[in-house]
Amino acid sequence: MGQIPRTLQPSLSERHFFGAELRRLRERANFSQARLGAMIRFSADLVRRVETADRFPSREFVEACDKALATGGALIRLLPLVEGSRANEGMRTASASAPPTPEPCWP
């Protein structure tokens, strides 16, 4: 018996939206994560992690999913949004982890 799928929240970010769309298309094709993973030569765990927005998808992953799910390019058209959010997230992470700028000490 399979696990209960985690509820997705597509409005949280572009990555969450992509994951929800991937799941919707996969379920429409009546594929399990394991079956899709085998078809695209990626692990079922990666499929799960992309669907739940725990991982960013690579271009190769997205192209393979588009082909296996016969989406007509629906997922690859979303890739620029996901890549843009990755760049923005990287900038937020970098600025959040940067050491604080020391304040000048004037006598």
Image (cartoon, grey):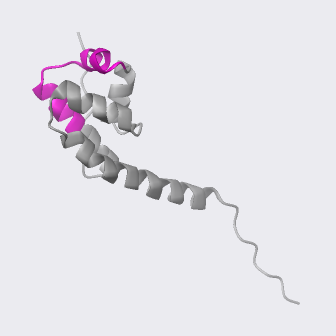
Q: Position of residue 26 (x, y in %)?
A: 18, 27
- As drawn, the residue found furthest toward the bottom would be 107
Q: Left or right of 70: which side holds 42?
A: right
Left or right for 30, reference 15: left
Q: Nearer the viewer, residue 48 or 25?
A: 25
At a point 26% along the width and 42% down the height, the residue shown is 76
Q: Is residue 98 above or below residue 31?
A: below
Mark count: 0
Q: Is residue 92 left or right of residue 75?
A: right
Q: Is residue 35 above or below residue 63?
A: above
Residue at 33%, 27% (x, y): give it.
48
Observer able to see residue 17: no
In which quadrant of the rendered image does the C terminus lie?
bottom right
Residue at 76 percent across and 73 percent down: it is 102
Report the residue that reaches farthest toward the top. 1
User: Magenta region's main secondary structure?
Assistant: helix
Residue 47, position as x, y percentages in the image: 33, 27
- Write the start and end of the magenta stretch as one range: 21-41
User: Is 27 one of the magenta-colored residues?
Assistant: yes
Task: Name the residue located 24 percent from the left edge and 47 percent from the top edge.
Answer: 77
Percent from the top left, x then y, of residue 13?
32, 52
Q: What is the quadrant of residue 103 in the picture?
A: bottom right
- Residue 62 to residue 90: above or below: above
Residue 43, located in which quarter of the rendered image? top left
Nearer to the camera, 7 or 32:
32
Horizontal relation, residue 9 to residue 45: left or right:
left
Q: Quadrant of the N terminus?
A: top left
